[in-house]
């Protein structure tokens, strides 16, 4: 009889422990599910995600990992993990700053967050080495670059002007998505992704950023600067603006870049100097 009571107590203690673990797991998940489904805009989505991570004690857990790596003498891992939480918070802050009260659906928020994290890569570059990256803005994954040079900032290029709906309209896509048919992003989502990409690129520079754009193509056709240029001038009225049209040197080797543009520039200078070949 005593043996049976002992087994019963062990089972009760085990069941109590199981329920305690189940409660710890389900409580934050249930709260997160409720908050994320009640969210209506980008700010509320980010707040729900941030509170969920804090409730799971992610900052404390990450800090414990860092201390563990330090005790093991693994300084590279400690440095790498020390930036994880700050990176997560920074991406959420960027979404709130760019989109704020913009109305979003859950699937749109997931896509935007996914893009944000895909643009960043954790890693440690040896301090004795410098690095130069050349890439299109949509494939650049570096974080806190010291100097950024963005070229070709023209209308329809940066941000990319893509308003075509394709074979399916946005309304068609919405109906098919509700029927669990996976399709590409609609024009609204693409526009939001492009805005986030522009913001991420412009805020990537830690110390210096240089933006350039041509005013004409190699055939002399006018090219309009991106709307980003006028917005930056409004935000930073003292921004330095330089032009390389005037005071060009005829024999400047810096102007020799590609065959067609170089040849066209040569013809232009020959006309200006009235140089004719017989």
Image (tube, rainbow, N blue to C red):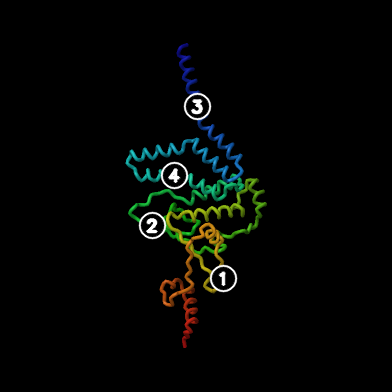
The spot of residue 83 in percent (x, y) is: 42, 45
Residue 156, quarter of picture: bottom right
Q: CA distance from mark 2 to mark 3?
A: 50 Å
* Residue 84: assigned label: 4
Image depth: mark 1 or mark 4 in front: 1
Q: Mark 4 or mark 3, which has the lower sequence index?
A: 3
* Residue 182: assigned label: none
The vertical placement of 129 against 60, above or below, is below
Q: On the rendered structure, is 247 left or right of 71?
A: right
Q: Which residue is mark 2?
A: 131
The mark total stands at: 4
Name the secondary structure under disc 4. helix
Label 1, residues with CA under 10 Å away: few <14, some 14-19, many ≥20: few
Q: CA distance from mark 2 to mark 4?
A: 21 Å
Residue depicted at 45% across the width and 43% down the height: 85
Q: Mark 1 or mark 3, which has the lower sequence index?
A: 3
Task: Determine whether label 2 and label 1 are within 8 Å by CB.
Answer: no
The spot of residue 29 in percent (x, y) is: 54, 35
Name the secondary structure under disc 3. helix
Q: Which residue is mark 3?
A: 20
Q: CA distance from mark 2 to mark 1?
A: 35 Å
Q: On the rendered structure, is 256 left or right of 107?
A: left
Task: Determine whether label 2 and label 4 are within 8 Å by CB.
Answer: no
Residue depicted at 57% across the width and 49% down the height: 99
The spot of residue 40 in percent (x, y) is: 61, 43
């Amino acid at each position: 009889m005593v043996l049976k009571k002992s087994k019963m107590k062990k089972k009760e203690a085990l069941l109590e422990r199981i329920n305690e673990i189940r409660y710890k797991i389900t409580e934050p998940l249930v709260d997160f599910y409720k908050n994320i489904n009640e969210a209506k805009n980008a700010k509320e989505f980010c707040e729900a995600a941030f509170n969920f991570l804090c409730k799971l004690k992610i900052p404390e857990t990450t800090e414990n990992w860092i201390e563990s790596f330090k005790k093991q003498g693994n300084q590279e891992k400690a440095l790498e993990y020390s930036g994880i939480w700050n990176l997560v918070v920074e991406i959420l802050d960027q979404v709130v700053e760019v989109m704020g009260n913009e109305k979003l659906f859950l699937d749109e928020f997931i896509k935007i967050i996914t893009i944000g994290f895909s643009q960043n890569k954790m890693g440690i570059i040896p301090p004795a080495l410098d690095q130069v990256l050349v890439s299109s803005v949509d494939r650049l994954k570096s974080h806190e670059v010291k100097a950024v040079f963005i070229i070709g900032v023209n209308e329809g290029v940066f941000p990319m002007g893509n308003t075509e709906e394709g074979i399916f309209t946005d309304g068609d896509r919405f109906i098919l998505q509700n029927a669990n048919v996976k399709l590409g992003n609609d024009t609204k989502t693409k526009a939001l992704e492009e805005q986030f990409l522009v913001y991420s690129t412009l805020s990537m520079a830690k110390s210096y950023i240089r933006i350039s754009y041509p005013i004409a193509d190699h055939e002399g056709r006018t090219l309009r600067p991106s709307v980003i240029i006028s917005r930056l001038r409004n935000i930073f009225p003292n921004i330095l603006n330089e032009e390389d049209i005037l005071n060009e040197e005829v024999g400047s080797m810096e102007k020799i870049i590609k065959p067609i543009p170089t040849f066209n520039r040569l013809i232009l200078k020959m006309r200006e100097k009235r140089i004719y070949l017989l």
